[in-house]
Image (tube, rainbow, N blue to C red):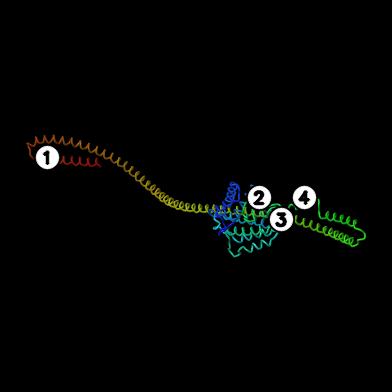
Amino acid sequence: LSAPAEDGTISRVVLEQVLRQNIARDEDVVKLMRLVRCGGAGGSGDRVDFLHFWQGLDQFYAETAAGHVARGGGCDTIAGMVRFRDGVLQIWRSQGAEDPSLAPISSQLLLGLLAEIKNIAVDPTYWDQVMQAVPTDEGASLTLPEVAEAVCVWLREALKAAPPSDGQPVAGPWLEGCPLSPLPSPMPSSPVASATASVRGMDSLTPNSDLHVAAELLEEIGQCIARDRPHVQRAVARLGAMIEAAGRAMHRWEEEVEALRRTAAMQGQRRQEIEAELHRAHENIDDAARVAGERDEARRRVEALTKEVVDLRDSYAAATDEMARLKARSDDTERQRKDSERMDWHWRGRCEQLERAVEESHGQAQWMRSEIDRWMGESRKRDADVQRLRGRLRAARLMARSSQGAAEEAEACAALLWRERCEHAAEGASAQHE
């Protein structure tokens, strides 16, 4: 910058102070600083590099129409520097870094950009010298402040060497003393400039018409010369021959100028085509950068989808293990169900057996009841017999008084009958219990 720092940048505060000293309106300073910030900050923290400031200054004068910035016309070197500036900033912004020191620019990219500018430049030798200043080592790179400081030096040299055109300095908005001053210096009109302007207003005068007028004047002068002065007549004749030769030479020169004009027109058309092709190339670069961004976004999406697939694969493996465990439990449950069915059939058969046994028990109970009833009937009969025997016994006792032997016999018979009755009663009770 006007006083570059060691890292090729200048403090925003210092820059704003310099601008306020050279710009009358504060709103213009605020607008210019805003354009510089919108251009990409141009540095880390509170510092600005020359390329961002230059681009912001171009935008400022383009919006306010307060000055003229050379672009593609007038000075080919400065126009090339403008292209180089925009290309470098585009490369730097495509890297997406906020701090220039952290985003070095590859020397190969710089050389490629300079080669494009050289191919369309009127004076390619200058750009050959610039390309020689770029390091060509493998993996070499430059930071944005380094490139900005170099462009600042090149621009000063170009402004000093560039001739003025149409009364305006080639540097446009930069003063000779301070290349970055945003105020154009007033150029006082000189006599040469006034004369040039007056000649430009005489569109009817051409070199051929001037020679024709000179020939007519020479003829009139020859008529006025006395016949007795042959040496003057010879001089006039020689002057006429010289004017005629100058006319023929002028005619040849006009033909050459016309040919050069046609060549210049063709070259201008070719230059426009090349500039259009360069513009398309820049658009292709922008498209490539956008495609690269889309590719990075697609890569991030693929990585996210890959992570989701891995998670789904893990979930599927866990679900498969759970299914295997559930299947094993299902097999165990099926075996238990079959065992339960077998046990059910077993117990059903056992129940049927028990039911049949119960039915048989009921039959046996009925048979036993009938037997008990029969034994009870027999017992009642025997009780009746016992009563009869007791009656007989009493009778016998009465009769026994007369005969002890008959009594003992009767007692024996009664005891025998009593034992038999007790045995029958016990057998009937046990049968009923069963």
Question: What amino acid type is highlighted by mark number 1?
Answer: Glu
Q: Which residue is mark 3?
A: 271
Q: CA distance from mark 2 to mark 4?
A: 25 Å
The one nearer the camera, 153 or 286, is 153
Q: Which one is closest to the eye, mark 3 or mark 4?
A: 4
Q: Which residue is mark 2?
A: 67
The one nearer the camera, 348 or 81, is 81
Q: Which residue is mark 4?
A: 201
Question: What amino acid type is highlighted by mark number 3?
Answer: Arg
* Residue 196 pos. (x, y %): 75, 53
Question: What amino acid type is highlighted by mark number 4?
Answer: Gly
Q: Which residue is mark 1?
A: 411
Q: Which one is closest to the eye, mark 4 or mark 1?
A: 4
Q: CA distance from mark 1 to mark 2?
A: 169 Å
Q: CA distance from mark 1 to mark 3?
A: 168 Å
In the current view of this chain or complex, which residue is farthest to the right? 227
* Residue 269 pos. (x, y %): 73, 54
The answer to whether residue 160 of the structure is visible from this angle is yes
